[in-house]
Image (spheres, rainbow, N blue to C red):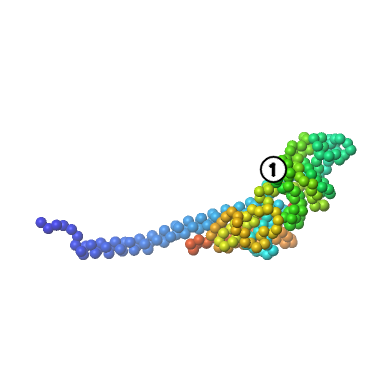
Amino acid sequence: MRARGFTLIELVIVIVITGILAASLTIFLKPVVDSYFDTRRRADLTDIADTALRRMAQDIRSAVPNSVRLPGVSPSTCFQLVPTIGGGRYRVASDTVNDTPAPLPCAPSATCSAPLDVAQATTVFDVLSPLATVPAQNDWIVIDNQNGGDVYAGTNTAQISAAPATPRAGDGLYRITIPGKQFPVGYGGGRFVAVANATQTVVYSCVGNTLYRTVAAFGANLAATCALTTGAVVATDVAACTFVYDPSQGATQQSGFVWMRLELSRSGESVALAHGVHVDNVP
């Protein structure tokens, strides 16, 4: 009895048919698979770019007025700012009804209010408004920043030398102590902002294919060269980035406006997102 099996011709036919099916599947399925991964890459890049823009916008919105600066040219690939942790109003005059002892004005104490007078050196002052985040010892107070470089030079900053205390009822919500400091004369807005000692200034810089967020101390123009690479990585796969800012462009809607554009690219796929943020430049 002859053993049953496949002939050589049958095997060849099976191989040919299998090859045709494999080629057909490759032709029709590969674009679908490639499209899936391309879409996934674009979505991933979009998410990275959107998160980076939102992170920068958060810092810009909370920045000390007039503290945003570029390295002298616009557009640029970096910018610097001073982020705040809050702010409020300070007492600008003594409580002439309840302060004791006479004669007024009296020295700040448990029975005397503590106003801040920009015409003389101040060591303690009362805060009249609620603070979402109460500054701690070693944090910084900034008062009047009409000139962009003042906050970096320390002209209008003072470091808190003791934990904020609770003043006499009616004087305010907090009493803040600083080393003797005379703030710029002529400012009558009665407002201050607080800056965390741990994040005195922040620089965003695009170097190579990476966007960095570098935290540093007050001082020189760290955005001057747009070359800082020591900070935290905000985004990778950066193909291009552009920052545009002018604190005063006359009577246009672009005054005090930061324009940010990020382009990310990976494996042949690219996305570009842009975002604009208005800056409150009123001290």
Residue toward you, 137 or 83: 137
Report the number of discs. Answer: 1
Residue toward you, 117 or 34: 117
Circle 1 is placed at which residue position? 136
Q: Is residue 133 left or right of residue 104?
A: left
Q: Tell me the SS state at disc 1.
A: loop
Residue that protrudes farthest toward the left in the picture: 1
Residue at image point 76% right, 57% down: 147
* Residue type highlighted by circle 1: Ala
The image shows residue 20, relative to residue 175, as above or below, that is: below
Residue at image point 23% right, 62% down: 11
Q: Position of residue 141 (x, y in %)?
A: 73, 47
Q: Is residue 47 left or right of residue 173?
A: left
Viewport quadrant of the N terminus: bottom left
Residue at image point 52% right, 61% down: 265
Residue toward you, 131 or 209: 209
Q: Is residue 272 visible?
A: no
Q: Position of residue 230 (x, y in %)?
A: 60, 56
Mark 1 Cα within 10 Å, few/some/many (few <14, many 20+)?
Answer: some
Q: Position of residue 36 (x, y in %)?
A: 44, 57
Res 212 → quadrant: bottom right
Q: Position of residue 283 (x, y in %)?
A: 75, 51
Q: Is residue 89 left or right of residue 6?
A: right
Residue at image point 62% right, 59% down: 228
Q: Is residue 192 visible?
A: yes
Residue that protrudes farthest toward the right in the picture: 103
